[in-house]
Amino acid sequence: MIAKPPHDRKLGIFGVSLTMARLNRLNDQAFDWLQNTVEKIIIDSQFLEDTPFSWVTIAIRYGLKNDEQPIYHKISKKYGDLPLSIEVDTHELIDASLEDLKKIFGKAVLKSLIHAGKKYKRPTKPLEEMLESLTKIK
């Protein structure tokens, strides 16, 4: 049986600093919007059905580059999550507006989920559509 988290969330997003740069004060607002928006897509698309994990956590690593794919960590036996991490370039975040942060973090989260979805043979089309819509915004 797959472990369940102590809450009802299907997606967890958090940030981890790899540099000494000051964080953008709008990061949490962007994370909240993204978590709620993408979690709805995960639920509606049945992304988590028949997987060896019950939810996904994504650590956004504030670093010096933008990764194209996530790093996978072991599925938690205690909490049942698939932990992923992906690096984003801190230089793009420092003075970014809320809309820019949503786009930057959104691309990282969606790339991570799409990559994991393909690995675990899950439906990724709704995630790909959201990624495409974020990519079109200048």
Image (cartoon, rainbow, N blue to C red):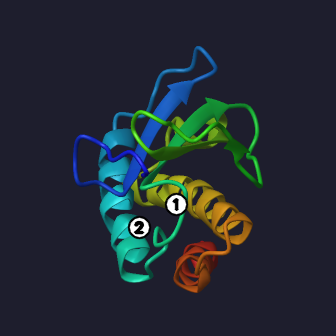
Residue at x-position 70% and y-position 48%: 70
Q: Is residue 136 left or right of residue 5?
A: right
Q: Which residue is mark 2?
A: 38
The crowding category of the residue bearing disc 2, from other C-alpha atoms within 10 Å (few below 14, some 14 to 19, many at least 20), is many
Front-most of 92 and 78? Answer: 78
> SS of the residue at dot 1?
helix
- Residue 56 image position (x, y, % from top left): 48, 52
In terms of image quadrants, where is residue 116?
bottom right
Find out whether the residues at labels 2 and 1 contact each other: C-beta distance under 8 Å.
yes
> SS of the residue at dot 2?
helix
- Residue 99 image position (x, y, % from top left): 42, 60
The crowding category of the residue bearing disc 1, from other C-alpha atoms within 10 Å (few below 14, some 14 to 19, many at least 20), is many
**Viewport quadrant of the C terminus:** bottom right
Amino acid type at mark 2: Val
- Residue 21 image position (x, y, % from top left): 56, 20
Decide if residue 26 is in sight here.
no
Amino acid type at mark 1: Gly
Decide if residue 25 is in sight here.
yes
Residue at x-position 55% and y-position 73%: 134
Front-most of 99 and 33? Answer: 33
Q: Is residue 64 left or right of residue 74?
A: right
Residue at x-position 60% and y-position 75%: 122
What is the distance, in whole Å, between disc 2 and disc 1 at their CAs? 9 Å
Q: Which mark is residue 2?
A: none
Q: Nearer the viewer, mark 2 or mark 1?
A: 2
Q: Is residue 27 left or right of residue 57?
A: left
Q: Is residue 118 above or below residue 55?
A: below
Which numbered disc flags the more N-terminal residue, 2 or 1? 2
Q: Is residue 64 left or right of residue 55?
A: right
- Residue at the front extreme? 1
Q: Which residue is mark 1?
A: 106
